[in-house]
Amino acid sequence: MTVSTQLPGYDHRPGDGPVLVFLHYWGGSARTWRPVLDRLPGQAAVTVDLRGWGRSRELPGPYTLQQYADDTKAVLADAGVTDYLLVGHSMGGKVAQLVASTRPAGLAGLVLVAPGPAKPAETVTPEYREGLSHAYDSDESTAAARDTVLTAASLNGEAKAQILADSRACSDEARLEWPLRGIAEDITRAARAIDVPVLVVAGEHDQVEPIGVLRRNLLPYLARASMTVIPGSGHLLPLEAPDELAQVLRAARLAGLPEARIGSRD
């Protein structure tokens, strides 16, 4: 495993391609994807600690979606990745859309896991964003968000502790950028420019990015999109449903991303 210290921290695991490139959620880190990768032995992968988070928390800003997209492309170049699927979760899913909109060479498709939609949901009001910005203020507030909003399936103690630790392992500026600005950024123009197949993976009981929001605020802007729903899960699919998500990714890697009419559900 190769670890870069010059760019945002990332791990590059050699193996069978195409390479799966993982981008984490607001509050997460590269290790958010460990349960999924543990179920994909031999799979080539790159997992990134986005700027301001995890090993990258000391890197200076800006911590904008565009900076994260630029960082992702720089990591891909540094790792020498030339044939890959981009897998983005929540905030990382919105970053993945921006990366894909530039039509980079080597990108075979997107898997957007409970992603931030291209068009902000109607519920993302200034009041909502201000409240969200305090979700990770303390272990108590983070635990409350984890147990009542972020998840629908039970987690083991290790996963619960990891969520607490990762939510605090960040710079203050990075922690505030997404809820106050990034979540409200309209990237529909970028989404319309994506020309690779896209699979949207939703959690059946996701309260953060509900199925209906993804159908209204994301799928209409993607030309080659399909959706699949993982039963019983909330927003933190990599931790709640790693078996099911690994199965989805294995199928995407081996058989290619399914293409369907916009708004369809597999």
Image: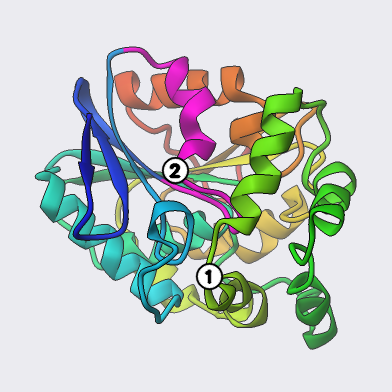
Whichever of callouts 1 and 2 sits on the residue coming sooner in the sequence is 2
The secondary element bearing badge 2 is classed as helix
Residue 251: name its quadrant. top left
Query: In this picture, which residue range is highlighted in magenta?
Result: 23-41
Which label belongs to residue 30? Answer: 2
Classify the position of the C terminus by image quarter: top right
The residue identified by callout 1 is 171
Q: How far from the left and from the top, in percent, is residue 191?
A: 43, 67
Extreme-bottom residue of the structure: 126
Q: How far from the left and from the top, in percent, is residue 44?
A: 25, 26
Classify residue 125 as left or right of residue 222: right
For image coordinates 48% across by 76% down, the residue present is 187
Classify the position of the N terminus by image quarter: top left
For image coordinates 63% across by 79% down, the residue present is 184
For image coordinates 44% across by 26% down, the residue present is 249
Callout 2 environment at 10 Å: few (<14), some (14 to 19), or many (20+)? many
For image coordinates 55% across by 80% down, the residue present is 186
Classify residue 71 as left or right of residue 151: left
Q: How far from the left and from the top, in percent, is residue 161?
A: 71, 36
User: How far apart are the alpha carbons under marks 1 and 2?
Assistant: 16 Å
Callout 1 environment at 10 Å: few (<14), some (14 to 19), or many (20+)? some
Query: What amino acid is at disc 2?
Result: Ala
Classify residue 81 as left or right of residue 60: left
Classify residue 188 as left or right of residue 117: left
Query: What amino acid is at disc 1?
Result: Ser
Using the image, determine if residue 56 lies above or below residue 161.
below
Q: How far from the left and from the top, in percent, is residue 232?
A: 80, 27
The secondary element bearing badge 1 is classed as loop
* Camera-side residue of 124 and 242: 242
Which label belongs to residue 9? Answer: none
In reply to whether residue 82 is colored magenta, the answer given is no
Using the image, determine if residue 172 lies above or below residue 145.
below
